[in-house]
């Protein structure tokens, strides 16, 4: 049994992982899916990591999972908890000294998103969240996710450089979603090779596939620890 610590993305809450968490628990694992602090523009990435570490405590066999913006917090948590594994799920892979605000241009995302949008007729990066974030998600779940949105991350967290001087000494995997209309899969695969030297694993789903493909996500996470 492993202890999975799943960290949500920007504007999100731990609820977004509830279906995956149920699947992981059915496979014998313990799961923490916290709501990171929100609604305070002075909060930093370290504050987010502090909240997670305090919640999880000193449990063994920890696997830290970060979705989307959660990839800025997940490595901090993985290092502090001496995790066995770090998994980024459609994650924004940060570089030391790079702020989240700088990531969009530095990573090549802006050009990649524009190029993919030109190919798919404007689906990628679409202003309609049902199109760009919740494609493939049952409408009632997408509605509930939007209802739960919060002011996260804080402006301070966005502006400050990523606090680690190097990637934590934790084995790292990346999962990308084939139908992701926010972070195109090909873009993230290339970024993973460039920044981590890691080959990504790909499964079906859009950016919020935790709500549309929970079984597939749980299976790949469970497979990593077996």
Image: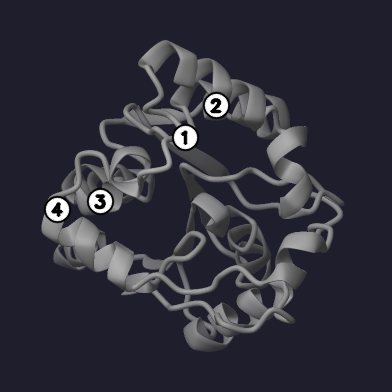
Q: Tell which of 123 and 60 is nearer to you.
A: 123
Mark positioned earlier in the residue sequence (2 or 3):
2
Which of discs 1 and 3 lies nearer the camera? The answer is: 1
Residue at label 1? 125
Q: Which residue is mark 4?
A: 139
Image coords of residue 30 (percent x, y): 30, 73
Q: In the drawing, what numbered circle is on residue 224?
A: none
Residue 113: which numbered mark, if any? 2
* First in sequence: mark 1 vs mark 4: 1
Q: Quick one: SS at disc 2?
A: helix
In the image as oriented, which residue stretches furthest toward the top? Answer: 119
Marks 1 and 2, the one that precedes in the sequence = 2
Which residue is painted at 57% across and 82% down in the image? 39
Alpha-carbon span between mark 4 and mark 2: 25 Å
Where residue 190 appears, as percent x and y from the top left, is 60, 22
SS at circle 3: helix
Please report the residue visible at 43 percent of the width from the left and 42 percent of the height from the top: 127
The CA span between labels 1 and 2 is 7 Å
Badge 1 marks a residue whose secondary structure is: loop
């Amino acid at each position: 049994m492993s202890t999975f610590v799943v960290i949500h993305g920007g504007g999100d809450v731990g609820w977004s992982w509830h279906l995956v968490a149920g699947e992981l628990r059915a496979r014998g694992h313990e799961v923490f899916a916290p709501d990171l602090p929100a609604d305070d523009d002075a909060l930093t990435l370290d504050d987010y990591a502090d909240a997670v570490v305090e919640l999880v405590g000193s449990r063994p066999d920890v696997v830290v999972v970060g979705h989307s913006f959660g990839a800025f917090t997940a490595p901090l948590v993985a290092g502090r908890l001496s995790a066995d594994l770090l998994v980024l799920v459609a994650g924004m892979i940060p570089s030391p000294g790079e702020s989240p605000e700088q990531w969009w241009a530095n990573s090549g995302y802006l050009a990649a998103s524009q190029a993919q949008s030109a190919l798919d007729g404007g689906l990628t990066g679409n202003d309609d969240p049902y199109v760009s974030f919740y494609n493939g998600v049952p409408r009632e779940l997408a509605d509930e996710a939007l209802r739960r949105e919060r002011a996260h991350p804080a402006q301070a967290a966005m502006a400050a450089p990523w606090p680690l001087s190097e990637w934590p000494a934790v084995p790292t995997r990346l999962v990308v979603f084939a139908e992701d209309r926010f972070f195109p899969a090909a873009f993230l695969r290339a970024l993973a090779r460039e920044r981590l030297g890691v080959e990504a694993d790909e499964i079906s789903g859009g950016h919020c596939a935790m709500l549309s493909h929970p079984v597939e996500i749980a299976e790949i996470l469970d497979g990593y620890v077996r």
